[in-house]
Image (tube, rainbow, N blue to C red):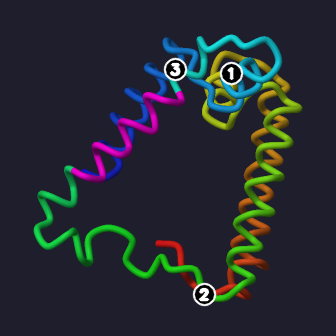
Amino acid sequence: MTVSIASLLVGLAVGYLGQRSRMCTIGGLRDWVLVRDTELLKGAAALVVGSWLAFGLVRVIAGTYGHGLIAVGTTPSGVWAYVAIVVGAVLLGFFATLSGACPLRQHVLAGQGRIGAWWFLGGFYIAAIVYTAWISPHIGSWVL
Protein backbone atom coordinates (compact mmCIF):
# COMPACT_ATOMS: atom_id res chain seq x y z
CA MET A 1 0.00 0.00 0.00
CA THR A 2 2.86 2.37 0.82
CA VAL A 3 4.50 1.73 -2.56
CA SER A 4 1.21 2.46 -4.34
CA ILE A 5 0.76 5.75 -2.53
CA ALA A 6 4.38 6.74 -3.09
CA SER A 7 4.08 5.84 -6.80
CA LEU A 8 0.92 7.92 -7.09
CA LEU A 9 2.55 10.92 -5.41
CA VAL A 10 5.71 10.70 -7.51
CA GLY A 11 3.60 10.24 -10.65
CA LEU A 12 1.52 13.30 -9.81
CA ALA A 13 4.64 15.38 -9.19
CA VAL A 14 6.37 14.24 -12.39
CA GLY A 15 3.15 14.69 -14.39
CA TYR A 16 2.61 18.19 -13.04
CA LEU A 17 6.22 19.19 -13.72
CA GLY A 18 6.12 17.57 -17.18
CA GLN A 19 2.94 19.44 -18.06
CA ARG A 20 4.13 22.79 -16.78
CA SER A 21 7.63 22.59 -18.24
CA ARG A 22 6.66 21.29 -21.71
CA MET A 23 9.79 19.11 -21.44
CA CYS A 24 10.46 16.98 -24.52
CA THR A 25 13.86 15.56 -25.41
CA ILE A 26 12.97 14.58 -28.97
CA GLY A 27 11.24 17.89 -29.63
CA GLY A 28 14.29 19.74 -28.30
CA LEU A 29 16.63 17.92 -30.66
CA ARG A 30 14.20 18.35 -33.56
CA ASP A 31 13.81 22.10 -32.97
CA TRP A 32 17.56 22.57 -32.61
CA VAL A 33 18.34 20.72 -35.85
CA LEU A 34 15.57 22.34 -37.90
CA VAL A 35 15.46 25.94 -36.65
CA ARG A 36 18.29 26.22 -34.08
CA ASP A 37 15.78 26.84 -31.27
CA THR A 38 17.23 25.70 -27.91
CA GLU A 39 14.17 26.34 -25.71
CA LEU A 40 13.14 22.67 -25.37
CA LEU A 41 16.74 21.48 -25.45
CA LYS A 42 17.37 23.17 -22.10
CA GLY A 43 15.00 20.67 -20.48
CA ALA A 44 16.92 17.74 -21.96
CA ALA A 45 20.19 19.22 -20.69
CA ALA A 46 18.66 19.68 -17.23
CA LEU A 47 17.51 16.03 -17.34
CA VAL A 48 21.04 14.81 -18.11
CA VAL A 49 22.64 16.98 -15.41
CA GLY A 50 19.97 16.04 -12.85
CA SER A 51 20.41 12.32 -13.60
CA TRP A 52 24.18 12.62 -13.33
CA LEU A 53 23.91 14.35 -9.95
CA ALA A 54 21.26 11.94 -8.63
CA PHE A 55 23.27 8.83 -9.56
CA GLY A 56 26.37 10.38 -8.01
CA LEU A 57 24.45 11.13 -4.81
CA VAL A 58 23.09 7.58 -4.62
CA ARG A 59 26.60 6.19 -5.12
CA VAL A 60 27.94 8.36 -2.30
CA ILE A 61 25.11 7.33 0.01
CA ALA A 62 25.51 3.65 -0.88
CA GLY A 63 29.15 3.64 0.14
CA THR A 64 31.57 1.64 -1.91
CA TYR A 65 30.55 3.07 -5.29
CA GLY A 66 27.02 1.77 -4.88
CA HIS A 67 27.97 -1.86 -5.42
CA GLY A 68 24.74 -3.84 -5.46
CA LEU A 69 22.47 -0.80 -5.27
CA ILE A 70 22.56 0.51 -8.82
CA ALA A 71 22.37 -1.67 -11.91
CA VAL A 72 22.41 -5.08 -10.32
CA GLY A 73 22.66 -7.50 -13.23
CA THR A 74 22.33 -4.82 -15.91
CA THR A 75 25.32 -5.79 -18.00
CA PRO A 76 24.17 -6.57 -21.53
CA SER A 77 24.88 -10.17 -22.43
CA GLY A 78 26.21 -10.66 -25.92
CA VAL A 79 26.02 -8.80 -29.17
CA TRP A 80 22.25 -9.28 -29.50
CA ALA A 81 21.69 -7.17 -26.40
CA TYR A 82 23.55 -4.28 -28.00
CA VAL A 83 21.69 -4.77 -31.28
CA ALA A 84 18.37 -4.69 -29.41
CA ILE A 85 19.38 -1.50 -27.59
CA VAL A 86 20.45 0.28 -30.80
CA VAL A 87 17.45 -0.86 -32.86
CA GLY A 88 15.03 0.04 -30.06
CA ALA A 89 16.58 3.47 -29.57
CA VAL A 90 16.52 4.23 -33.29
CA LEU A 91 12.91 3.10 -33.68
CA LEU A 92 11.76 5.04 -30.61
CA GLY A 93 13.56 8.16 -31.81
CA PHE A 94 12.15 7.79 -35.33
CA PHE A 95 8.54 7.32 -34.24
CA ALA A 96 8.78 9.97 -31.53
CA THR A 97 10.10 12.42 -34.12
CA LEU A 98 7.26 11.56 -36.50
CA SER A 99 4.70 12.02 -33.75
CA GLY A 100 6.26 15.29 -32.64
CA ALA A 101 6.95 14.42 -29.02
CA CYS A 102 8.86 12.04 -26.78
CA PRO A 103 7.11 9.44 -24.57
CA LEU A 104 7.04 11.78 -21.55
CA ARG A 105 5.36 14.50 -23.58
CA GLN A 106 2.98 11.95 -25.14
CA HIS A 107 1.85 10.92 -21.64
CA VAL A 108 1.21 14.57 -20.78
CA LEU A 109 -0.66 15.14 -24.05
CA ALA A 110 -2.74 11.99 -23.49
CA GLY A 111 -3.65 13.29 -20.05
CA GLN A 112 -4.75 16.55 -21.67
CA GLY A 113 -7.06 14.62 -24.00
CA ARG A 114 -5.14 14.42 -27.28
CA ILE A 115 -6.34 11.30 -29.11
CA GLY A 116 -3.19 10.97 -31.24
CA ALA A 117 -1.14 10.64 -28.06
CA TRP A 118 -3.30 7.70 -27.00
CA TRP A 119 -2.51 5.95 -30.29
CA PHE A 120 1.21 6.60 -29.80
CA LEU A 121 1.10 5.24 -26.25
CA GLY A 122 -0.89 2.20 -27.39
CA GLY A 123 1.88 1.33 -29.84
CA PHE A 124 4.50 2.15 -27.21
CA TYR A 125 3.02 -0.30 -24.70
CA ILE A 126 2.41 -2.99 -27.32
CA ALA A 127 6.09 -2.71 -28.27
CA ALA A 128 7.03 -3.02 -24.58
CA ILE A 129 5.00 -6.23 -24.36
CA VAL A 130 6.60 -7.60 -27.52
CA TYR A 131 10.06 -6.79 -26.16
CA THR A 132 9.35 -8.39 -22.80
CA ALA A 133 7.72 -11.50 -24.24
CA TRP A 134 9.88 -12.27 -27.29
CA ILE A 135 13.07 -10.21 -27.45
CA SER A 136 14.29 -10.02 -23.85
CA PRO A 137 14.37 -13.81 -23.27
CA HIS A 138 16.75 -14.19 -26.24
CA ILE A 139 19.28 -11.54 -25.21
CA GLY A 140 19.57 -12.37 -21.54
CA SER A 141 18.19 -10.94 -18.36
CA TRP A 142 20.14 -7.71 -18.01
CA VAL A 143 17.43 -5.23 -17.05
CA LEU A 144 16.28 -4.87 -13.46
Give the foreground label among 3 and 2: 3
Q: Residue at x 50, y 14 (%)?
A: 21
Judged by its main secondary structure, the magenta piece is helix
Residue stretch rendered in magenta on the structure: 44-56
The Cα atoms of the two marked residues, 3 and 1, are separated by 20 Å
Marking on residue 20 = none
On the question of residue 1 being in view, the answer is: no
Badge nearest the viewer, 1 or 2: 2
Q: Give the quarter of the image for residue 73.
A: bottom left
The x and y percentages for residue 69 are: 26, 70
Residue 50 sits inside the magenta stretch: yes
Task: Give the alpha-carbon distance from disc 1 to disc 2, as whole Å.
Answer: 36 Å
- Whether tag 3 and tag 2 are in contact, CB under 8 A, the answer is no
Quarter holding residue 62: bottom left
- Which of the marked residues, 1 or 2, is nearer the chain's N terminus? 2
Identify the element where label 3 is drawn: helix
Residue 77's tag is 2
The residue under the point 61% across, 33% down is: 104
Q: Is residue 111 magenta?
A: no
Q: In the picture shown, does residue 54 fall above or below 89?
A: above
The quarter of the picture where residue 80 lies is bottom right
Q: Secondary structure at mark 1?
A: helix
Q: Which mark is residue 109?
A: 1
Q: Mark 3 = which residue?
A: 42
In three-dimensional space, the C-alpha distance between marks 3 and 2, rounded to whole angstroms, equals 34 Å
Q: Residue at x 81, y 63 (%)?
A: 87
Q: In the rendered structure, are the residues bearing label 3 and label 1 in contact, judged by CB atoms less than 8 Å apart?
A: no
Q: Amino acid at mark 1?
A: Leu
Question: In the rendering, at what x and y percent does residue 3 appear?
Answer: 30, 53
Up-down relation of residue 10 to residue 87 (above or below): above
| Count of numbered labels shown in the rendering | 3
Q: Residues within 10 Å of mark 1 (few under 14, many from 20)?
A: some
